[in-house]
């Protein structure tokens, strides 16, 4: 990482703070969208679950 580039995690945190939910329903919907994106990223192009090897 270049010293001129901001930390990716810090950028994500700032973006999260900029979109603060108004109420609990908004908060739940934002969390569900995050979970959906995470779950989708765990699948390959054919819709099959990718195995993660640790």
Image (cartoon, rainbow, N blue to C red):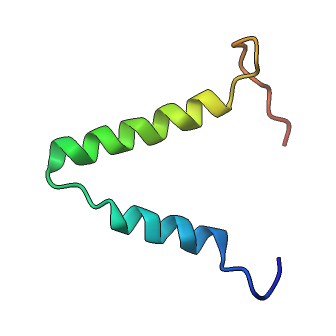
Q: Residue at x 66, y 76 (%)?
A: 7
Instruction: Report the residue that reaches farthest toward the bottom.
Output: 3
Q: Is 40 on the left or on the right of 54, as rendered?
A: left
Q: How many marks overall?
A: 0
Q: Quadrant of residue 3?
A: bottom right
**Quadrant of the image for the C terminus?**
top right
Q: Residue at x 48, y 68 (%)?
A: 13
Instruction: Report the residue that reaches farthest toward the front.
Output: 4
Q: Quadrant of residue 40?
A: top right
Image location of residue 52, percent across then percent down: 80, 34
Work out whether residue 3 or residue 54 is closer to the camera in this orientation and state it.
3
Image location of residue 34, percent across then percent down: 46, 42
Q: Is 14 on the left or on the right of 48, as rendered?
A: left
Image location of residue 53, percent across then percent down: 85, 36
**Quadrant of the image for the N terminus?**
bottom right
Image location of residue 51, percent across then percent down: 80, 26
Q: Is 31 on the left or on the right of 50, as rendered?
A: left
Q: Residue at x 71, y 19 (%)?
A: 49
Q: Residue at x 69, y 13 (%)?
A: 47
Instruction: Report the residue that reaches farthest toward the left.
Output: 23
């Amino acid at each position: 990482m270049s010293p001129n580039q901001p930390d990716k995690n810090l950028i994500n945190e700032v973006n999260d703070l900029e979109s603060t939910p108004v109420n609990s329903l908004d908060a739940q919907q934002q969390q569900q969208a995050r979970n959906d994106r995470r779950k989708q990223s765990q699948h390959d192009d054919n819709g099959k679950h990718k195995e993660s090897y640790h």
